[in-house]
Amino acid sequence: MDYQLLLLLHLLIGGYWLGGDLGVFYIAGKIADPAQPLPVRLFSAKAMMLLDMIPRTCLIMAFGTGLTVATQAGLLPLHGWLWLVWLVTLGWLALAWAAFVKEHSAAGHRIARVDFYVRLVVLAGCVAAGVDAFSDGGLIAQSRWLGAKLVLFAGIISMGLLVRIQLRPFGPLFGKVVSNTATDAEQLALKQLVARVKIPVLCIWMIILAIMALGKLKPF
């Protein structure tokens, strides 16, 4: 693919990522609001799960397009290995969507667990590559702004994993809402849970903007 088109795609992915996350952020408030009618909360929960696949997809595509853009710009030594980059990217994307489609089944839980560990591996790889880009004489030609972007991308993945961990009580709590058996304390717990999750989500937005700024300005 032409370098300029690939770069444009990479930038558009960042924009769709933020847009999708904004939608999830707004809808989450409806789900946690006990003043909302149950049909509204149910519809919001279904809409949120589907809409959340936009940022999840964008993260994975940003990984593949980002590595490709950096390689074509001569910043990463992956010439001849881009086929593997895209094999990993598309395999990871298929895994994420399979976890979504099968989310309420035992198979879906197993797939989601595999996806969780894949993200840990990618996180570690981005940190290692970022540190290498900061140093002189490593596998990656010294490029501190690129190193910062890689480490920040790892930060996004870590915030996403934190959200998953924080949301573990969501299913049981919302299940009680659906069955009309939730107590006032459980309604409050759900509302507080959603409020806590918004903190790492806000961090993700700030990191995305910082990554975009680094890519544009290349300040160091």
Image (spheres, helix red, strand yellow):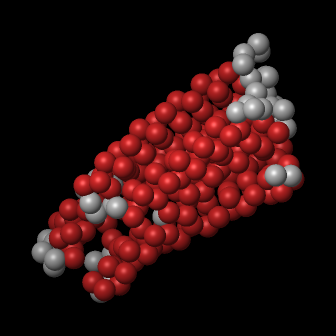
Please report the residue visible at 60 percent of the width from the left and 43 percent of the height from the top.
87
Foreground of the two, 119 or 195:
119
Q: Residue 209: horizontal and vertical position, in percent?
A: 68, 52
Label tally: 0
- Left/right placement of residue 4 relative to residue 126 reads right
- Left/right placement of residue 183 relative to residue 78 reads left
Q: Residue 155: horizontal and vertical position, in percent?
A: 55, 40
The quadrant of the rendering that contains the C terminus is top right
Foreground of the two, 143 or 97:
97
Residue 198 visible in the displayed image: no
Q: Is residue 206 above or below residue 12?
A: above
Q: Residue 83: horizontal and vertical position, in percent?
A: 68, 40
Q: Is residue 71 above or below residue 212?
A: above
Residue 19 visible in the displayed image: yes
**Which image quadrant for residue 55?**
bottom right
Residue with the most extreme top position: 137
Q: Is residue 116 above or below residue 185?
A: above
**Which image quadrant for residue 136?**
top right
Please report the residue visible at 42 percent of the width from the left and 45 percent of the height from the top.
115
Please report the residue visible at 60 percent of the width from the left and 56 percent of the height from the top.
58
Foreground of the two, 52 or 32:
52
Foreground of the two, 197 or 129:
129
